[in-house]
Image (cartoon, rainbow, N blue to C red):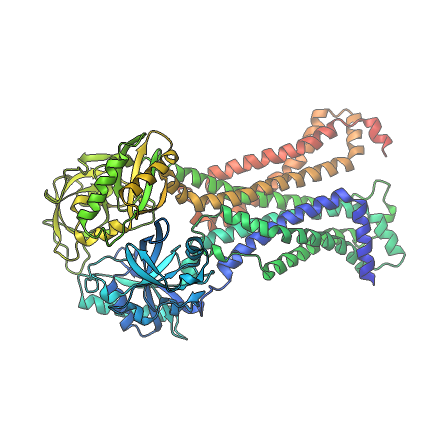
């Protein structure tokens, strides 16, 4: 009954102060909604278990080279570990495989995978229709089958389950669709749209240990086996393979990681930091409201004293004040939960495409429960602080206070000042973090990628393997398409390659330098392998620093040549790379071939602008071995430099591709700038979200200081009037008030520097080219914060300087 009375009284108070009530609810709704949105993303990506069977026992397996870098496995390596391991229920493999999907409607290039037949069973995947792969699907001589990912099933086949059992054409070959994967399923670390069996025993590289490393391995640990136990077992196998095949497995080890940990990767640090940032903003909102409630509660000191004199206990009065704040906070919490869905949608739109588990992010009852619990906690926090100070040891002072309404005295003033200092400190921490992210972004933006991306249009093609299985087939297509693209209006240059910079694809080849023996038991040199035509370097704006580039005259009838990147040349031929010869091992069916280095090209950032330039070997398309032709057919990148907007050329390029072969699909025709934008996506996301919270924190700190100084001026009107009557100038009064506000801001900045040291240290993984304690950033943030708080103090200070002594005396 008493509680209902408290609620009714609180609602009457809110009705009497509608502006304050609505403003408080609005600010709380925004901050709690932001917290709910962030928590939804954190819960879905970092906390919630993976949607696989016994996900805590799933691991990824990597091969480790002598330089401690991770690498995928060859087919023989996968089979060795699967057969010899003692600690896994199963080990499965996944390899990238792109296909040209045709036969019904327009041809479409789809991103796919080759999966060992036990892969889906190991994860515990239940298909939406049909079946997943079974062991027989990997056996030699079996019919070709495929699984459709749900997005492709919806987009291409309209969600019609009758597609199961039908034949589709992948790279010109018929495959039977045996199942549709469930809507929630995503391949770990891949956006694959289709899957086909790996069929390792029929692969031409089945027995070639020097073949391409392209398989990612996944394992399910036996019950009771730890990651350390499995790591020891697999490294035992690695040592056995090293003894059996000393050249092919020189100094190679194995490394395991939990699948969830592998999927989350660097996103874990980013998301926890964003969660901390939005939590700080909520803390600042609570501090602001606590300060305002303290002022309002101080003004009700006489009311509290009268109620106490009439028999009200301190606990009863405390409950009344806390009930008011909790009701206000709950109203904000309800509004915040309503905004949470919108906030999650906005975050996902801003987030990079590679944000892990993004498809699983959704608001659920647990998130709503946490949001409401946070609301109650906030109400208790910002309600209890003023209530405990108003209901001090001597309530009778409220009866003796004058008509001004209690100011709260020095004790209350100290609490309000402490709250403002805390807000400034939190604001400094967030602004320091945002400043470091901005500096990192600008430094990264200034990194030279090694190519000119402006006015370059790219096209990613996939050629049907049944019709483009030889080098001559691919070159015929190349020559016909080049002859069509070159005359297009606005096209200045055109070229082709198997891997475009920043596309995320990798290919390497081993080589030895002629006349230089590799030490026994040591791995020989290796380089990133690029197959290009004569127009590639010019179109991409990659400079030739020495010798020459690839020429149209470099054919299978001329001497085999290659162009080395600058970093590769400096490492192996610091004096005179041009004219040197290497034995290039890019043909698994033949001994290494002799290749002459005819030029040195400028370095290119191949995987990321944050990584060192790649050590590359560029070989002519016309001289590639038949063994690697399928890699060009699966991923055939074209580039065209144009004098007009690249987007304006895209329709014409697509038309010319179809004119050469109507069954060839172009997955992405886009400007080269888009690849650069994608490389910035994760940093831009962190900067936008963190920066928004930092700006909100700055505004809250300024608002809190403004409110405190304004209240202080109002309370000291009589004192200021006396000072002016006794000869104080407007300037001295202005400085008096400004000194008070800026002193609090300076104290907050000092405390913020200490807090920022801890916060920014955790942000190191998100920084590039700048220290977590960068003095320039800290100084700039200090100046910005002092300027903002100074501006906030300026208005009440000017009002104080204009006080009329006579008006001040009469107001008393």
Q: Residue 179: where, in percent of width, then height?
A: 40, 64
Residue at image position (76%, 53%) is 324
Up the image or down, 177 lies above or below 409; here it is below
Please state if 313 lies on the left or on the right of 237 as rendered.
right
Front residue (pair 458, 225): 458
Front residue (pair 436, 445): 445
Q: Looking at the image, can residue 788 be seen?
A: yes
Q: Residue 12: where, in percent of width, then height?
A: 82, 50
Residue extending farthest right? 310
Residue at image position (14%, 55%) is 518
Q: Residue 41: where, in percent of width, then height?
A: 52, 55
Front residue (pair 624, 416): 624
Q: Looking at the image, can residue 415 be seen?
A: no
Residue at image position (83%, 43%) is 405
Query: Looking at the figure, which quarter contains the C terminus?
Result: top right
Up the image or down, 352 lies above or below 241; here it is above
Please state if 698 lies on the left or on the right of 628 as rendered.
right
Q: Residue 760: where, in percent of width, then height?
A: 49, 47
Please state if 283 lies on the left or on the right of 536 as rendered.
right
Up the image or down, 238 lies above or below 367; here it is below
Up the image or down, 263 lies above or below 124; here it is above
Q: Quadrant of residue 369?
A: bottom right
Q: How many marks?
A: 0
Query: Looking at the figure, which quarter contains the N terminus?
Result: bottom right
């Amino acid at each position: 009954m008493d509680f209902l009375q408290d609620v009714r009284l609180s609602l009457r108070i809110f009705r009497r102060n509608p502006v304050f009530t609505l403003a408080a609810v609005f600010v709380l709704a925004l901050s709690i909604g932001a917290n709910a949105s962030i928590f939804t993303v954190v819960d879905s990506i970092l906390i919630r278990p993976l949607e696989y069977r016994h996900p805590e026992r799933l691991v990824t397996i990597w091969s480790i080279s002598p330089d401690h870098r991770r690498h995928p496995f060859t087919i023989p390596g996968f089979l060795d570990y699967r057969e010899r391991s003692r600690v896994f229920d199963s080990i499965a493999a996944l390899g990238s495989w792109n296909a040209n999907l045709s036969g019904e409607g327009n041809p479409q290039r789809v991103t796919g995978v080759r999966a060992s037949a036990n892969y889906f069973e190991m994860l515990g995947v239940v298909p939406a229709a049909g079946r997943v792969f079974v062991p027989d699907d990997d056996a030699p001589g079996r019919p070709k089958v495929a699984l459709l990912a749900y997005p492709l099933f919806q987009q291409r086949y309209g969600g019609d389950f009758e597609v199961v059992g039908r034949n589709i054409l992948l790279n010109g070959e018929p495959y039977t669709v045996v199942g549709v994967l469930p809507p929630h399923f995503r391949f770990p670390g891949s956006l694959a749209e289709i899957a086909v069996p790996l069929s390792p025993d029929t692969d031409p590289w089945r027995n070639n240990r020097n073949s391409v490393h392209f398989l990612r391995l996944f394992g399910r640990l036996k019950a009771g086996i730890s990651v350390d136990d499995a790591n020891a077992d697999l490294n035992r196998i690695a040592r056995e393979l090293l003894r059996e095949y000393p050249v092919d497995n020189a100094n190679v080890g194995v490394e395991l990681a939990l699948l969830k940990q592998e999927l989350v990767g660097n996103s874990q640090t980013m998301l926890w930091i964003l969660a901390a940032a939005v939590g700080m903003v909520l803390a600042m909102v609570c501090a602001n409201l606590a300060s305002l409630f303290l002022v309002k509660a101080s003004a009700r000191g006489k009311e509290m004293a009268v109620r106490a004199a009439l028999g009200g206990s301190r606990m009863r009065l405390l409950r009344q004040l806390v009930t008011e704040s909790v009701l206000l906070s709950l109203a904000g919490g309800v509004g915040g939960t309503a905004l949470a869905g919108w906030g999650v949608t906005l975050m996902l739109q801003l987030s990079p495409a590679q944000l892990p588990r993004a498809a699983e992010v959704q608001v659920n009852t647990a998130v709503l429960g946490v949001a409401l619990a946070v609301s109650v906690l906030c109400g208790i926090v910002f309600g209890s602080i003023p209530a405990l100070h108003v209901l001090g040891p001597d309530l009778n002072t409220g009866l003796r206070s004058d008509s001004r309404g209690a100011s709260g005295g020095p004790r209350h003033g100290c609490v309000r000042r402490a709250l403002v200092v805390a807000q400034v400190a939190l604001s400094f921490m967030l602004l320091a973090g945002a400043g470091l992210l901005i500096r990192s972004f600008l430094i990264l933006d200034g990194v030279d990628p090694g190519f000119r991306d402006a006015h370059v249009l790219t096209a990613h093609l996939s050629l049907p393997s049944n019709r483009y299985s030889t080098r001559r087939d691919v070159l015929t297509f190349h020559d016909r398409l080049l002859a069509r693209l070159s005359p297009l209006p606005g096209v200045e240059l055109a070229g082709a390659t198997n891997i475009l910079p920043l596309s995320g694809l990798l290919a390497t080849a081993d080589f030895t330098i002629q006349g230089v023996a590799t030490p026994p038991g040591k791995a020989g040199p290796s380089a990133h392998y690029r197959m290009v035509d004569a127009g590639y370097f010019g179109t991409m704006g990659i400079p030739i620093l020495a010798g020459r580039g690839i020429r149209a005259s470099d054919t299978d009838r001329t001497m085999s040549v290659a162009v080395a990147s600058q970093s590769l040349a400096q490492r192996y031929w610091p004096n005179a790379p041009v004219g040197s010869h290497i034995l290039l091992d890019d043909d698994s069916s033949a001994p290494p071939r002799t290749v002459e280095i005819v030029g040195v090209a400028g370095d290119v950032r191949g995987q990321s602008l944050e990584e060192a330039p790649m050590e590359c070997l560029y070989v002519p398309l016309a001289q590639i071995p038949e063994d690697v032709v399928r890699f060009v057919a699966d991923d055939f990148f074209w580039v065209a430099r144009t004098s007009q907007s690249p987007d304006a050329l895209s329709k014409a390029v697509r038309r010319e591709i179809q004119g050469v072969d109507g069954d060839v699909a172009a997955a992405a025709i886009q400007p080269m700038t888009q690849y650069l934008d994608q490389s910035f996506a994760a940093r831009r996301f962190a900067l936008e979200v963190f920066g928004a919270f930092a700006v909100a924190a700055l505004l809250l700190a300024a608002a809190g200081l403004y409110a405190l100084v304004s209240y202080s001026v109002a309370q000291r009107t009589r004192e200021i009037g006396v000072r002016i009557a006794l000869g104080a100038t407007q300037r001295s009064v202005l400085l008096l008030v400004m000194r008070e506000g800026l002193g609090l801001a300076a104290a907050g900045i000092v405390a913020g520097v200490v807090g920022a040291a801890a916060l920014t240290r955790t942000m190191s993984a998100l920084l590039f080219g700048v220290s977590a304690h960068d003095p320039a950033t800290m100084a700039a943030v200090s100046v910005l914060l002092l300027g903002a708080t100074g501006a906030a103090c300026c208005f009440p200070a000017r009002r104080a300087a204009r006080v009329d002594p006579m008006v001040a005396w009469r107001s008393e």
